[in-house]
């Protein structure tokens, strides 16, 4: 039997099989390379996201530190301002008393004849101011937990009737609305307006106390204790002073 053709056939078959295997190997290598490229790209994207999150976290930490520092300075500076305002008010009262007692009348004032103007015709009584209506509206909304609407009423009162006797109370209630919403930083600032701008207001001791509680709620124990001490010193007979004394203990 002639075996030569058979050997040639086998050699041809093996050569074709080797070529096919080489082609498959190239295809597999290309697929592996694509997978590696995709994996590298995904890893790069993930790393960029991690870097961005780390950067944002750093900014948040920095802002938190800055805000805490500002509130700490606010407590110290405002405490000094409170004492200065009260000292000036006390000195002003002493001067007024001295002038009232020390004034001596040396001669009677000259008699001046005045001519009464003709009486004006009766006019209808002027319409009552609506500052009280605005205040009641704000209080009702505050009681109903409509905090934004309540602030709008109180703010309108402040803008239209800046000389109204209700202005200090309206300002205090704006702070109360933020406090009820647990926006303690905003409440602190609104209470501060009452403390600085209306030193003779009956709401000043309450503003000091609620500001101290707000400081306590945000974890600023130092400013909270400073405010509690201010209340006890400036308003020792007030109900807020009794509460502040318990806090200091």
Image: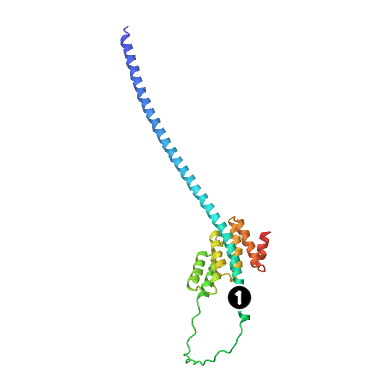
Report the quarter where the C terminus lies: bottom right
Which secondary structure, mark 1? Answer: helix
* Residue 194 pos. (x, y %): 56, 67
Q: Residue at x 62, y 75 (%)?
A: 94
* Quarter of image, res 240: bottom right
* Residue 187 pos. (x, y %): 55, 62
Nearer the observer, 56 or 35 = 56
As displayed, is residue 174 above or below residue 7? Answer: below
User: Viewed as shown, does residue 144 lie left or right of 49?
Assistant: right
Q: Residue furthest front?
A: 106
Q: Is residue 100 visible?
A: yes
Nearer the observer, 61 or 84 = 84
Q: Residue at x 59, y 57 (%)?
A: 217
Q: Is residue 175 visible?
A: no
* Quarter of image, res 25: top left
Nearer the observer, 78 or 88 = 88
Report the quarter where the N terminus lies: top left
- Specify few, some or many for label 1: CA neighbours under 10 Å numbering under 14, 14-19, or 20 or more: few
* Residue 216 pos. (x, y %): 60, 58
Q: How is the image coloured?
A: rainbow
Residue at which label 1 appears: 95
């Amino acid at each position: 039997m002639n075996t030569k053709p058979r050997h040639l056939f086998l050699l041809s078959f093996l050569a074709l099989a080797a070529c096919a295997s080489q082609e498959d190997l190239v295809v597999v290598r290309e697929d592996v390379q694509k997978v590696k490229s995709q994996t590298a790209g995904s890893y790069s994207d993930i790393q960029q996201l991690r870097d961005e999150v780390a950067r944002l976290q750093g900014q948040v930490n920095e802002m938190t530190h800055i805000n805490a520092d500002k509130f700490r300075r606010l407590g110290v500076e405002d405490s000094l301002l409170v004492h200065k305002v009260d000292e000036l008010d006390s000195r002003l009262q002493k001067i007024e008393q001295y002038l009232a007692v020390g004034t001596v009348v040396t001669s009677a004032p000259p008699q001046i004849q005045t001519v009464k103007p003709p009486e004006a015709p009766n006019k209808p009584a002027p319409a009552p101011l609506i500052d009280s209506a605005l205040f009641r509206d704000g209080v009702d909304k505050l009681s109903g937990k409509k905090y934004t609407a309540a602030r709008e009423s109180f703010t309108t009162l402040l803008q239209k009737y800046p000389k109204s006797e209700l202005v200090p109370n309206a300002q205090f209630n704006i702070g109360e609305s933020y406090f009820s919403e647990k926006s303690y930083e905003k409440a602190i600032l609104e209470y501060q307006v009452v403390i600085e701008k209306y030193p003779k207001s009956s709401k000043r001791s309450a503003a000091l106390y609620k500001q101290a509680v707000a400081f306590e709620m945000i974890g600023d124990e130092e400013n909270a204790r400073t405010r509690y001490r201010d209340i006890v010193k400036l308003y020792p007979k007030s109900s807020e002073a009794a509460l502040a004394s318990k806090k200091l203990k």
